Image: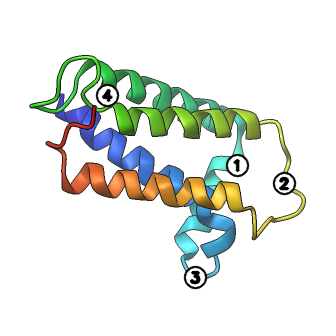
Amino acid sequence: MVQFYLLSIVYLVISAGLLLVDKYGTDLLFLINIKTFYNSRRSIKLIYISIGFLTAIGLILFPIAPGPMVIGDLLPAANIVVVLIYLLKDIRKTEDVVEFNNEKRNALGFITLGVALVHFVFPWIVII
């Protein structure tokens, strides 16, 4: 289904923005707005995580043609699952101090942005 394709790209780009906001928030102010909205209520965090879970399942079950059933969009789905694990681990923390040089989070943000870009530019590529 094409809807999961579009939703996965949007989800990956927003997730990359959430991961890279501390480093690039001063240059890209809309990232601060996204993070403020995400951190405003716990229900928004849970809804965002559940949308990611459903998107990952949808990518696996309904890949873009010519992808094989069940493992068609494995790389974007795996990246969404890794981001979900990070967000679930981070859901209980309250941010008192901004970490500008959190290398693991920044690397995950750049990888997520790269997967979104490759998934957008080359949707027909099947990586098995």
| Residue sitting at x 63%, y 65% | 21
- Using the image, determine if residue 62 lies above or below residue 105: above
Residue at (38, 51) in percent of width and height = 115
3D distance between C-alphas at marks 1 and 2: 10 Å
Q: What's the distance in space between the residues labelled 2 and 4, CA to CA?
A: 32 Å
Q: For the view shown, which residue lies furthest in the front direction?
A: 128
How crowded is the residue under tag 1: few (<14 C-alpha within 10 Å), some, or many (20+)?
Answer: some
**Residue 47 occupies quadrant:** top right
Is disc 4 placed on a helix, strand or loop? Answer: helix
Residue drawn at x 32%, y 58% is 117
Report x, y in % for residue 108.
58, 53
Quarter of the picture holding the C terminus: top left
Q: Is residue 83 visible?
A: yes
- Residue on which the image places disc 4: 59
Q: Quadrant of residue 13?
A: bottom left
Q: Nearer the viewer, mark 1 or mark 2?
A: 2
- Dot 3 or dot 4: first in sequence order is 3
Q: Residues within 10 Å of mark 2 (few under 14, many from 20)?
A: few
Q: Which mark is residue 39?
A: 1
Instruction: Kindly check if marks 1 and 2 are in contact, taking CB atoms under 8 A apart as contact.
Output: yes
Which comes before the other along the chain, label 1 or label 2? Answer: 1
> Which callout, 1 or 3, points to the residue nearer the camera?
3
Give how far across and how far down residue 2 sits, in percent. 18, 34
Question: Gap in Å between the C-alphas at discs 3 and 2?
Answer: 20 Å
Earlier in the chain: of badge 3 and badge 2, it is 3
Q: Is residue 89 above or below residue 23?
A: above
The amino acid marked with disc number 3 is Asp
Left/right placement of residue 30 relative to residue 121 reads right
- Ranked by sequence position, the earlier of labels 1 and 3 is 3
Which amino acid type is shown beneath numbered disc 2?
Glu
Q: Residue furthest right?
A: 96
